[in-house]
Amino acid sequence: MEIFDQPDTVNTQFAELLLPVPIPKLFTYRVPHAFNDHVLIGQRAIVQFGDRKIVTGIILSIHQQAPKDYEAKYILELLDNFPSVNDLQLRLFQWMADYYLCTLGEVMNAALPSGLKLSSESMVQLHPAFNLDESNHAFSEKELILLKRLQHESLAYSDIAKLLGTKHLYTILKSLTGKEAIILFEEVKEKYRPKTEKKIRLTAQYATSDALEKLFNLIASKPKQEDVVLKYLQHVSVIHHPEANKDGLSKKKLLTEEISESSLSTLVKNNVFEEFDIIVPRFDIQDKSDPPLILLSEEQERAQAAIFKSFESHTVALLHGITGSGKTEIYINLIRKALDSNTQVLYLLPEIALTTQIVHRLKKVFGSAMGIYHSKFSDAERVEVWNGVLQGKFNFIVGVRSSIFLPFDNLGLIIVDEEHDSSYKQQDPAPRYNARDVALMMAQMHHAKVLLGSATPSIESYYQTQQGKYGLIELNKRFGDAQLPQVMLADMGRERKQKTVKGEFSGLLLKKIDEALKLKEQVIIFQNRRGYSPMVNCEDCGWVPKCVNCAVSLTYHQFRNALVCHYCGYKESLPQQCPTCTSTRIKTVGYGTEKLEEELSLHFAEAQVQRMDLDTTRSKNGYETIIDQFERGETNILVGTQMVTKGLDFDHVSLVGIFNADRMIHFPDFRSYERAFQLITQVSGRAGRRDKPGLVVIQTSGPDHPLLKTILKHNYKDFFNTELADRQLHDYPPFTRLIEITVKHTDKKICKAASETLADQLKQNLSYIRILGPGEPAISKIRNQFLMNILLKVPRGKFDLANIKKTIVTLSTQLVTEKEFRSVRVMADVDPM
DNA sequence: AGCACGCCGACT
DNA sequence: GTCGGCGTGCTC
């Protein structure tokens, strides 16, 4: 590999590469002299990493310091002749790595669509000189199985692992390599391919009117071929505009019933026509229809003016607008204004809200300058959005949390809609970032403005407005003066005594559903738990089926007739007989969306009941289908999880039923009141539109709970004040910043010991902040890993956060260098939700 | 994170 | 003896 380079000269350059691996350092590669004038910071480069792996890295810096302790490998290839990642992004990535306590590589992994991260896969193929019958080696059974398959095709490591049913391929592969039966190679997968269209045009020699005349004479006896040429000329008037031939005609357009592929290919063979490919975008180039004039209500006008006013003195403004108050119209005006002044705009939405009406509406207004970034998009589509932003094709992006990673270079406005939504926080793989907070940081870097919008702002954001840090704009009236829904509580305790409860339904809710259906109105039922029942148990001995990998009971799913673990996916069938006492009296405990769906169908036999949860929306269009059916009125009752709480505006919903409010309120977590308030308010907002106020029925066993009282009154401010006082009393955000550290290990004792050691050391080194734990989390084992949590409460603004984080990282890395804790995993979650 | 390599116990 | 288990260290 070194052969192609010249010997060392003065100008030998090295590049620091960011690789998509969770190792907290950069890697130095040598720049081949041939690339000296082409290397750019932010450019993608292909390098070999380790013995044979090939990966894409990003060039972070270029210098001339040869590493002292090792020989740098060469950069194999530079991808593109432009940087894929700009300077602002690199700064943002670094900030995220520091703030969220993860490596730059992890940020890169999350940031780049995998189409931009080509990487190699280890493959195995038969040795070209190998012949099984002539080989004088002996082979084991597994080796033979593998060799037989390799006669037909090359296999990836993962395929072989599956084929042989073992993870340990090393010895087998080593033995076969030794016998010269196989060779190993790396296959680089170029993941992104642009979409192309086949086009046809006349070859240069026939693209003049003279030549065409000759051609017609030539093919006069071949009517089929004549037809092809005529059809072509019909679409492309070569005679009048010879230059039009250059763009040709799409093959699809040319080939119709009268025109066959074979006569065309004869003409191609005879060099009359030629085929060529052009790259076409995957997204319809749909230009904006005439932007509908948006008429703002007086209230909206006032809010809009207030936002502009606020932006004069504040970077961030919070628009607190109750459901149905018409925030979208205001957004559209702001976006337009930002685009008019030639800056980019990012509009963030929670995952689920993105698939709905709002996107269609924006598309109509902004046309093809608007790009959409969604997790259900294919990788190729995502690369196209990325490149579209890079090339300035998209100035406006509507997207989910990961769209903060796109290569913006000149943002003027970021809108974070439903700013309180927990789907902005990435949970599992690091970086565990909150897109709302990253957006605030981005805005600082771009000198952009941020508009946070919510009907139920997070305590943190609202607190900032009270401190004067953010502007606050309230939108208190529903659009067109629609009324807020009336909220009623169904007292389950009293109803049980009076025996008016049927199944899981209170008499009150049943009666109201019945009334709504009679008026041909629609009903939404909210139950934040999927499956049929969260648990089953044996009535005789109390046995409960548990997950084999996690410390949770299994949820019973009726449609699959199986017990399923919601944490690791483990599945088993529902036993007919209790395995401990052989009793057949196995019953379900508790209820989820499935069971409610079943009961509703029983109570209201004539009504169409539809369920919307993770299980019914898994397919690509599952969600849209359910929404469409509901919108068209084909569904009378919609039962669902959180999904029904967001972004849906229906005109005929008059009743919302809420189950298990108690479980939401009493969830053991400092945010449970906030979450319950938000969820209940959001789903209540689905009831009633325009002319008629809706009704919300909350089923509860504790109707006197103060939180329910504030919900009844629709009083956000009350809720905020009470909650804030409580947060202050118990040292929770916004008064402190939380950092949660989780220690993981397959052995419970080691996990415990490691977490205790770490907590002790943290307490010693950071004696000035409160450190709680280690404690066992509610679910103490997931995927066979035991978990322990340590919680750090850092008072806001008093201490050097960067320093504290550094200590955490140092102590955690130190911990795992201790012999007994070698395989312990330590993860940090900054600002957990 | 992968992946190579080496050491160990449980079997033919 | 060998196979397959797992712990350990490294990646420019």
Image (cartoon, coloured by chain):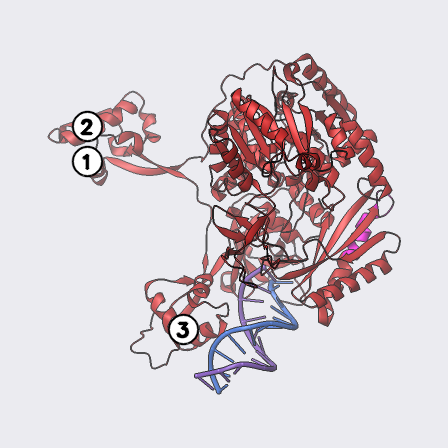
Chain colours: A red, B purple, C blue
Within 10 Å of the Cα at label 1, are there few (<14), some (14-19), or many (20+) other Cα atoms? some
Residue that badge 2 annotates:
A227
Q: For mark 1, name the chain.
A: A
Q: Is residue A60 left or right of residue A6?
A: right
Q: What amino acid type is highlighted by mark number 2?
A: Asp
**Subunit of mark 2?**
A
Rendered image quadrant of residue A827: bottom right
Q: Is residue A800 magenta?
A: yes
Q: Position of residue A101 (x, y in %)?
A: 72, 52
Going by the numbered disc 1, the residue's amino acid type is: Ser
Q: Residue at horizontal 53%, vertical 32%?
A: A638
Res. A263 mark: 1
Do the residues at pointers 3 and 1 share their chain? yes
Residues in magenta? A795-808
- Answer few, some or many: residues within 10 Å of disc 3's Cα (few below 14, many 20 plus, some between 14 and 19): few
Q: Earlier in the sequence, mark 3 or mark 1?
A: 3
Q: CA distance from mark 3 to mark 1?
A: 53 Å
Quadrant where the image shows the C terminus of chain A: top right
**According to the image, label 3 marks what residue?**
A142
User: Marks 1 and 2: same chain?
Assistant: yes
**Horizontally, is A268 left or right of C8 in the view?**
left
Name the subunit of mark 3. Answer: A
Number of other residues with Cα within 10 Å of mark 2, as a class: few under 14, some 14 to 19, many 20 or more? some
Which marked residue is nearer to the observer: mark 3 or mark 1? 3
Q: Secondary structure at mark 2?
A: helix
Which residue corresponds to the image point at 38% horizontal and 69% vertical from the top-left? A146
Q: Is residue A479 visible?
A: yes
How far from the left and from the top, in percent, is residue A197? 36, 36
Q: Residue A645 appears in which quarter of the rendering? A: top right
Is residue A704 toward the left or the right of residue A453 in the image? Answer: right
Mark 1 vs mark 2, CA separation in Å: 9 Å
